[in-house]
Image: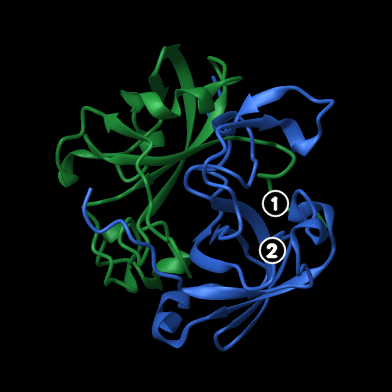
Chain colours: A blue, B green
Amino acid sequence: MSETNMVPVGIVCSPFKERGDAPRQGRLSDELSKITIFPEYLDALLGLSEGADIFILCWFDRSDRSVLQSHLGGDETRPIRGVFASRSPNRPNPISLTLARLVKIEGNKLTVKGLEALDRTPVLDIKPYSEQFDTPIKE
Amino acid sequence: MSETNMVPVGIVCSPFKERGDAPRQGRLSDELSKITIFPEYLDALLGLSEGADIFILCWFDRSDRSVLQSHLGGDETRPIRGVFASRSPNRPNPISLTLARLVKIEGNKLTVKGLEALDRTPVLDIKPYSEQFDTPIKE
């Protein structure tokens, strides 16, 4: 696999400074976070609008990439799961996936609600939520 | 940002051999794909069960990482959007996000339905779908 390096396209500015501060899922908090998109990627925001539901993919640079199994929710009274069966931030490729609400757009600064990322976490990608594709197949 | 290299944790075996073969979204096809998880990551599968809805994150190694804007759906009659406002495979970090159904687990081989990835696409991560966290915030 060639050229597998990731480039940060922006950075999170959040009230969560250390690992203990962040909720297990941003959804559990009403705090707002800001994302600064680096100027060279500003054109990629064309068509995003305030109020949109967006998936934010970050690179959890303070995660432990060697972990393959852990207790659910980091709680030792709960079962052990493989990281591919959990949403643990510790995993071989610590890419986070959070569905957040885009509250405000001011140039290259995005204000979002529902993001659990720590302050200064690199942002890798933003994808618009699609009800058609992002809800389970019905059979 | 240190250590931003991704490691493939598995590889896709799919009927889609070239870019023109793959549907725009796997959801549009009933084809099954297989994912081979590399043996060193087998422990990370603990707790995944057949029938589960899973997000599969792949590295679209045949994408153009320099594209910041494109026509929706690759259709020139449709509006131009920034890649952060579209699900185009071409983006600065070509990480795909597909919600698929885990049909079968046989050791390190997963059979999935609803994955649009090309044959031999590297797999980066698997995350279980959570209705609680992966549906838009209601207000």
Viewed as shown, does residue A127 lie left or right of B40?
right
Marks 2 and 1: CB-CB under 8 Å? yes
Q: Chain of mark 1?
A: B
Viewed as shown, does residue A120 lie left or right of A31?
left
Q: Could you say where residue B112 lies in the image, as x and y percent from the top left? A: 41, 23
Label 2 secondary element = strand
Viewed as shown, does residue A8 lie left or right of B52?
left
Q: Which residue is mark 2?
A: A101
Q: Residue at x 53, y 32 (%)?
A: B54
Q: Between marks 2 and 1, how big is the CA–CA gap?
A: 8 Å
Q: Which mark is residue B136?
A: 1
Considering the image in quadrants, where does the C terminus of chain B appear?
Answer: bottom right
Q: In the rendered structure, which amino acid carries the disc numbered 2?
A: Arg
Q: Which residue is nearer to you in this view: A15 or B73?
A: A15
Q: Residue at x 81, y 57 (%)?
A: A20
Viewed as shown, does residue B27 lie left or right of B43?
left
Against A81, residue B17 (above or below) is: below
Q: Could you say where residue A122 lies in the image, as x and y percent from the top left? A: 54, 68
Q: Which residue is nearer to you in this view: B61 or A2?
A: A2
Q: In the rendered structure, which amino acid carries the disc numbered 1?
A: Pro
Label 1 secondary element = loop
Q: Residue at x 63, y 73 (%)?
A: A120
Q: Which residue is nearer to you in this view: A26 or B69?
A: A26
Q: Could you say where residue B113 lies in the image, as x and y percent from the top left? A: 40, 25
Q: Quadrant of residue A121?
A: bottom right
